[in-house]
Image (cartoon, rainbow, N blue to C red):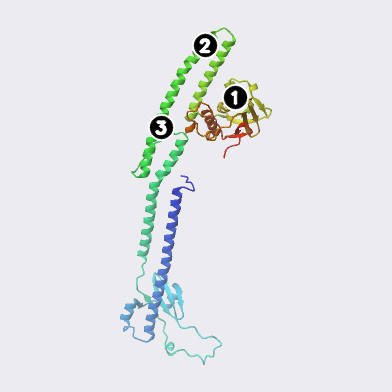
Amino acid sequence: MSINKHSILRLITLFFILIFTLINGLFCIAHQHFSKQQEVEQIRRFLLADRLFFFGHNQHDLSPELAQLMIQPSTLSSKKLLSQGSTIITLPFGKMIEMNGHTFFVKLLPPPPPHHFDKFAFRPPPEMNHFQSMVLEDIQPHSLIMFWIVLAGVDTLILLFFAYLLSKLLPLHRLKNSIIAFKEGDTSLNIPITGEDEISQITHEFNHKLETIASMREARSLFLRNILHELKTPIMKGALTTDCLESSVDQERLQRIFTRMDYLLNEFTQMERFSSGEWHLNFQEYRFVDLIDHACDILLCDKKSLTIKGEDIPLIVKVDFELLAIALKNLLDNALKYSTTQPTLIILSKTIEICNDGKALPEEKRDFSKPFNREYENSSAGLGLGLYLTHSILQKHGFRLEYDYTNGLNYFRIVLNKSE
């Protein structure tokens, strides 16, 4: 599942990772603090016990005091502890050693005097003359199991809350993907609903709206196909009747009219397939001059009615021939309709320009991504559906339709480089 860097899911995931890391970091700091405090407390109790022995009390007499300090003399030898144990800390007169999960204190002689001291000038204290190695053991329990239980509990709660929140937001991600698929033309979606929260309600409404749109689209498609089918019969009969007439100028004109009507009917069928998403583009390489010839054939106009510049440029484009010819036909048709002089078609290496004189296209009609706007819906002047279809066809090819008005001339420009 790919996630956009601005996605809510990604931001929440990063937030939970930050919180999880921060809490565990704080627990690590607390663990180090408690361990240090425990170590300081052990040193204090060992030193108090050492002081009791230092003043020469009998070991049996010290039992109550040692029990209060949770210290007892150890049966292990100092040599064994020093050789096999792990030193925790070294003090001036002893070492704290850990061995087999227990903590011991080994009493040591003070360090000898420097070698340049006069040996007769230095005398050890009287107590040191009778020094015996002493080993004390800490018998106070130091289990950190509650610390780890609390840490595990907090981490589990964070992870469970994150999993719960993620399970609630994943339907939103699926809904987003479904909306994108719907935009691409897939109206057969039915997103599963697993709850009664706001996202589930939105999903339910989206599913309901999809069913309505799919039903309307099916009815529209059936209506258009019935109309196209019913129109084909009289057009075919008219064409056959015209063929039976004697050759004359009127007969040729009628033939051209019925041929034009038949082509327009096929074009409407293609547009219906294109707008409903059923049209599968067939990209092949063609010479652009062949597209101009086909567009003029559709319009039933002569190329001489246009001023074509750059026709000698060997421009090759990879397009769906029929669709792009329809788009070019719409632009040429508008230029021929609304120009008082002969329109001009300019072929360049990366753009195609169609210019004609006349009034500028109003600003509110220059959004070709919509067939009409509210102000323009009832207009019968054209430049609505044709430019919308042209824009849609060019967009499918990765081209752009641009408009400019300069020095009394309308410029419709097809930009052939792929749109960003």
Q: Identify the residue shown where x is 38% and y is 41%.
A: 202
Residue 215 to residue 171: above or below: above
Q: Amino acid at mark 3?
A: Ile
Image quarter for residue 420? Answer: top right
Residue under label 2, please give it: 240
Image quarter for residue 21? Answer: bottom left
Residue 206 to residue 266: above or below: below
Residue under label 3, please give it: 213
Q: Earlier in the sequence, mark 3 or mark 1?
A: 3
Mark nearer the viewer, 3 or 1: 1
Residue that protrudes farthest toward the right in the picture: 312
Q: Is residue 218 left or right of residue 367?
A: left
Question: Disc 3 and disc 1: Cα gap in Å?
Answer: 37 Å
- CA neighbours of label 2 inside 10 A, class few (<14), some (14 to 19), many (20+): few
Between 218 and 153, the one nearer to me in the picture: 218
Between 92 and 243, the one nearer to me in the picture: 243
Which secondary structure lies at badge 3? Answer: helix
Q: Position of residue 359 (x, y in %)?
A: 59, 30
Which secondary structure lies at badge 1? Answer: helix
Total numbered badges shown on the rendered structure: 3
Q: Is residue 328 left or right of residue 63?
A: right
Q: Identify the residue shown where x is 43% and y is 74%.
A: 97
Question: Disc 2 and disc 3: Cα gap in Å?
Answer: 40 Å
Q: Amino acid at mark 2?
A: Leu
Q: Position of residue 164 (x, y in %)?
A: 37, 50
Residue that protrudes farthest toward the top in the picture: 246
- CA neighbours of label 3 inside 10 A, class few (<14), some (14 to 19), many (20+): some
Residue under label 1, please give it: 336
